[in-house]
Amino acid sequence: EVQLVQSGAEVKKPGESLKISCKVSGYSFISYWLGWVRQMPGKGLEWMGIIYPADSDTRYSPSFQGQVTISADKSISTAYLQWSSLKASDTALYYCARPGVGAVHGFDLWGQGTMVTVSS
Amino acid sequence: SYELTQPPSVSVSPGQTARITCSGDALPKQYVYWYQQRPGQAPVQVIYKDNERPSGIPERFSGSSSGTTVTLTISGVQAEDEADYYCQSADSSGTYGVFGGGTKLTVL
């Protein structure tokens, strides 16, 4: 089955680091871009960035450049989203999502989401 | 940075036609994608590449474009179509993506 399975919910304190994951199964990990989308509580979707696992080409939204790091491990078909120093404003639901074949944009497959709560 | 503009809300009665617009300067150059998100669920793509419908999406969903505005049309709206709808596209160079602010569709 083609699916994206994300890591579980996280509760962190401000200033802590975090790395959440998105494991791919059912298709060739290196053949598709993989992106991350933020949804703050009660708010809309925000495009964060995207990575091409074959060569680690990564693109970020200007709003998220320098705030997060997207990476991928081809050996285990897993993509990551990480923070070096969390803020309360990072509290949100984070989705990984895959564009269609040959596409950079337009997500046709979504993970279940990872809830990140940052609170002192 | 680049922005897409959607109306915050649209209301229609069952059986009527709902039209949700999305405006952005780069839309003539970049494809638009539309997503439906029901409460507590991950988004689902309902239109890709401006006007293509993914497998499994009802025919009542369609997309169109005119200049810097694109439109998601839902014909014969059903109660199950009540959800938030988001457009998505890319900046003029195609480097990064962007979502519209979302439109809440209410079926009266």
Image (tube, rainbow, N blue to C red):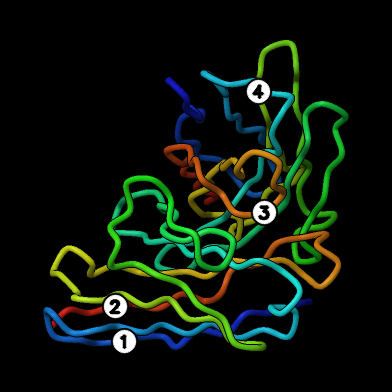
- Kindly identify the residue that appears in the image at 81 percent across and 65 percent down: A62
Q: In the rendered structure, which amino acid carries the disc numbered 4?
A: Thr
Label 1, secondary structure: give it: strand
User: Which quarter of the picture shows residue B95?
Assistant: bottom right
Of callouts 2 and 1, the N-terminal one = 1
Mark whose residue sits in front, 3 or 1: 3
What SS does tag 3 mark? loop
**Which one is nearer the viewer's eye here, A85 or A101?**
A101
> Disc 1 vs disc 4: which is toward the camera?
1
Viewer-side label of 2, 3: 3
Chain holding disc 1: B
Disc 4 to disc 3, C-alpha distance: 19 Å
- x 29%, y 77%: residue: B105
The three-letter code of the residue at mark 1 reads Val
Q: Amino acid at mark 2?
A: Leu
Tell me which numbered mark, 4 or 3, is placed earlier along the sequence: 4
Q: Hey, what amino acid is under mark 3?
A: His
Contact, mark 2 vs mark 4 (Cβ under 8 Å): no
- The chain letter for the residue carrying disc 4 is A
Q: Quadrant of residue A67?
A: bottom right
